[in-house]
Amino acid sequence: MKTTVIRNAAWVVAWNDALGRHQYMRDVDVAFTGNQISHVGGGYDGPVDAEIPGGDVMVMPGLVNIHSHPTSEPLRKGITDETRSPNFYHSSLYEYLTIFNNDPEGTPPCHKVAMAELLQSGCTTIVDYSMPFDGWLDLLAEAGIRACVAPSFRDAPWYTKDGHLLEYDWSDPERGPKGFEVAKRTIDLANQHPSGRLTGMMSPAQVDTLSPELLRQAHDYAEERNLPFQIHAAQSVNEFVEMVRRHGKTPIRWMDDMGVLTDRSIIGHGIFLDHHPWLHWSTREDLDLLAERGVTVAHCPTVFMRRGIALNTLGGYLKAGVNIGIGTDTYPHNILDEMRNAATVARAVAGTVDDLNTSDIFEAATIGGAKALRRDDIGRLAVGAKADLVLVDLKNQAMRPLREPLRSLLYVAAERAVRDVYVDGRLVVEGGKCLTIDLDAELTALEAAQQRSMARVPEIDFANRTADEMAPMVYDVH
């Protein structure tokens, strides 16, 4: 197997197993053999097939993204940036995301655009929360990313006929069970994929779109097969009110009563817990329940901050003992942007910089995500871990003057300073450019898909509005 050494790297974000955390190392060697890291430290003197000068780079572990929607979100760029939906508490889920949707022809380019963006921002592992489609697994393998597929299914999709009443279609009793069976087959195919980089996750869609029976079955299957389990929950005021209407309990309390809050469970978003001020609820139990059960929250601040919605607060969740992972969810699929937004929004909501530290954000995007995926071989630079690593260009203008490299990367430079990315020991980004995807070509195809989507809007919208009426331009066009 080929051995590559990054010689005398100026900065390395290395894993200290004794302390259970990352640490900086200066002027050391990082070597990987095949798809595993074989050396982190000074004076590597083993066999070398390729050598990379490290004097101008920071080497860090590849970032782990535990919640994304790559088949739909890139298409909505320029459309759902500042949607207003006052009758649904400004959530875009009910009035907009059911309208501005993709078609089969647009799905592959949309997915490829997201993968290229992720890789170019230093993301090496993704949870792909998509409805299964033909060619899905091969697209992920060709992109060169490490992926955990999360094939989505539900009993009752939501809809609105008037823009203020949210309804659920429970008319087809076979919809959920059929989707569950497809999900199981897809997960098996992922785990057997010849790329060796694909795994699977049990991932029913949303807590309010599932029957109690299907929810229990899905979690039981995850337990039986030792799979991670993820579901969207506590993501809107409407969902909270609906679950209280049905069950007389918060969504989190109801899930606990169903037995599906465990240490394999990931809650997508987890914003509207009973302590959130928008709810004015009387209990303060949900946050402690998540911590006690060992649940992970997939935190995706960007899509919510666009609507004026925020977790309350990220630092509070961490202090309570909740494991946090970072997800991109929306466009751009740029995990460094998402990390910066996580930090700044948390501090703004808390009213203090002390809500969290930069290390909290970096750990969420590395070891927090790895823990959620039940893995100890990603999200860290350590001997025996997967050779998923990122080389940051310290000479990039946005990184200079250089004192604190992670802060400069997260708060200033972001993807501009990501030079090279390796996944499983394979170079997939070089000089900031994705090698596995022709991004310009896929963007051209995606632009055509966006035009088709916008043309369909009046046929789908309950009020027959046009795309320009629902998402007006910033200024009039003359």
Image (cartoon, helix red, strand yellow):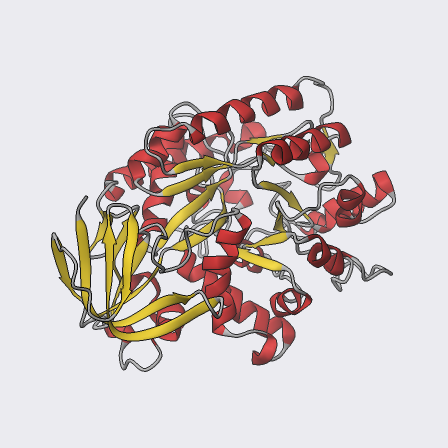
**Residue 187 visible in this rendered orientation of the protein:** yes
- Pinpoint residue 371: horizontal percent, then vertical percent: 53, 53
Using the rendered view, name the quadrant where residue 54 is placed. bottom left
Name the quarter where the N terminus is drawn: top left
Number of marks drawn? 0
Q: Is residue 83 left or right of residue 75?
A: right
Tell me if residue 11 comes above or below residue 255 in the rendering: below
Residue at position x 31%, y 51% in the image: 387
- What residue do we see at 26% from left, 43% from top? 439
Of 238 and 318, the residue lying toward us: 318
Q: Position of residue 312 (x, y in %)?
A: 67, 65
Q: Nearer the viewer, residue 306 or 233?
A: 233
Seen as rendered, the residue at the extreme front is 46
Vertical arrangement, residue 174 with respect to residue 413, above or below = above
Front one among 36 and 67: 36
**Residue drawn at (73%, 60%) of the image:** 287
281 left or right of 391? Answer: right
Q: Quadrant of residue 111?
A: top left
Q: Nearer the viewer, residue 11 or 346?
A: 11
Spot occupied by residue 391 in the image (x, y as percentages of width and height): 26, 61
Image: 293 above or below 144: below
> Can residue 132 be spotted in the picture?
no
Residue 347: image x %, image y %?
58, 74
